[in-house]
Image: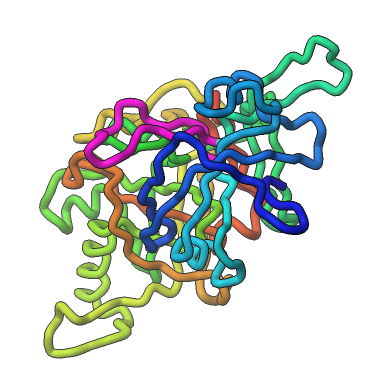
Amino acid sequence: SILKDNRNYLWEISDYAPTEEVYGAVKGEINWKRSHYRFRDPRLAISKDAVNSIPSTKNLKQSTGIVGVLDKALTNEATGGGESEPFALLGLIGENNPNADRNRFPAPRPTFFHQACITSENDEEGNEFRVQSFSVDGPNRLLTLSTGSLISDAVPSMQLVDLRIYGDFVDHYAVVVDEVTFDGVLVTAQSLKKFTGTAERPIVAVFDTGLTGGLLIRDFWDVMQRKMIEINKNPITDTEDKSDTIHCFQSVSLSIKQSTTPQGSLHIEGNPQVTATSSSTSACEIASSLEISPHLFYIDPIDLDWFDDDLSAPYVIILGQAFLSRHNLNVDMIKRRASFSE
């Protein structure tokens, strides 16, 4: 736990100013506080280097770190109204973008993985090791951290792509999608290029364990609304004004190439920066629907300012617990690989 004893939350003011953040589709404020972390596993700790690099934490206990405390609006969105303010989240992002546009994004705050380390109980020298990979076991609600890779080289896996080249402020866990099927309508980057008459933009899925359903970045949402309405796929409102017609998505499935070899790259036309493994051996299928996850599934639009140029950036779909809760998601942050399995 980070957080509280029987009476009070155990955080103090830090030198980091509050930031405006978007969680789900809600905008609010996060206050960055000093907090005393306490872990069930004694091998997990806040590193000495992290403690000493955080303003106002000199000479404090090793387990003191920085945590983001959500305001009322973000707390309500994150918990479904199940918790009262203040509320803190443990984020699983590993790296930020030191070159992000500071007119849009504040200076980076310490991530949990920048602060956390794994130690050995029998190591008298106190050596600390960086977390290399993590596993989120959805069915068993279990988070595992490791100093090595949790993905075998012999197991087909997905190549993570770096969206920071487009201006993203952190290194989201993203993979290039070959095909997406919305309510039986299959789309690819190439088919969307033909449909819109614009330059080809890759389709990218981002894994977000803190999200409930699914989100489409606004450009992707607008294109898919046009496409679904043109083929008259079950709009939830239908007026004479076509601009008021909205399609309610009932199901989504994605196909993503996997490979046993992380080397090599596949360049996408017009977007040489986004790469995926070239020697695919299988496809990873990720799906959800109202039928499969009636209490979790939804697809909504979201207005994100992740990218410097929205016209050339990827079409992004963000996958939350409606897609993840029945599976295991493994991420190797160093080798930039992910695997997804039941």
Residue under the point 40% across and 36% down: 170
Q: Which is the main secondary structure of the residues drawn in magenta?
A: loop
Residue under the point 65% across and 54% down: 327
Foreground residue among 80 and 320:
80
Foreground residue among 69 and 322:
69
Residue 50 at x, y = what percent? 58, 24
Q: Is residue 340 found left or right of 40 in the rendered image?
A: left
Residue 125: name its quadrant.
Answer: top right
Does residue 152 show up?
no
Residue 144 at x, y = what percent? 71, 40
* Image vertical order of residue 75 relative to residue 273, above or below: below
- Is 110 in the magenta? yes
Q: Is residue 315 found left or right of 334 in the rendered image?
A: left
- Is 292 in the magenta? no
* Magenta stretch bounds: 92-111
Does residue 224 show up?
yes
* Image vertical order of residue 114 relative to residue 70, above or below: above
Residue under the point 73% across and 58% down: 7
Q: Is residue 95 found left or right of 165 in the rendered image?
A: right
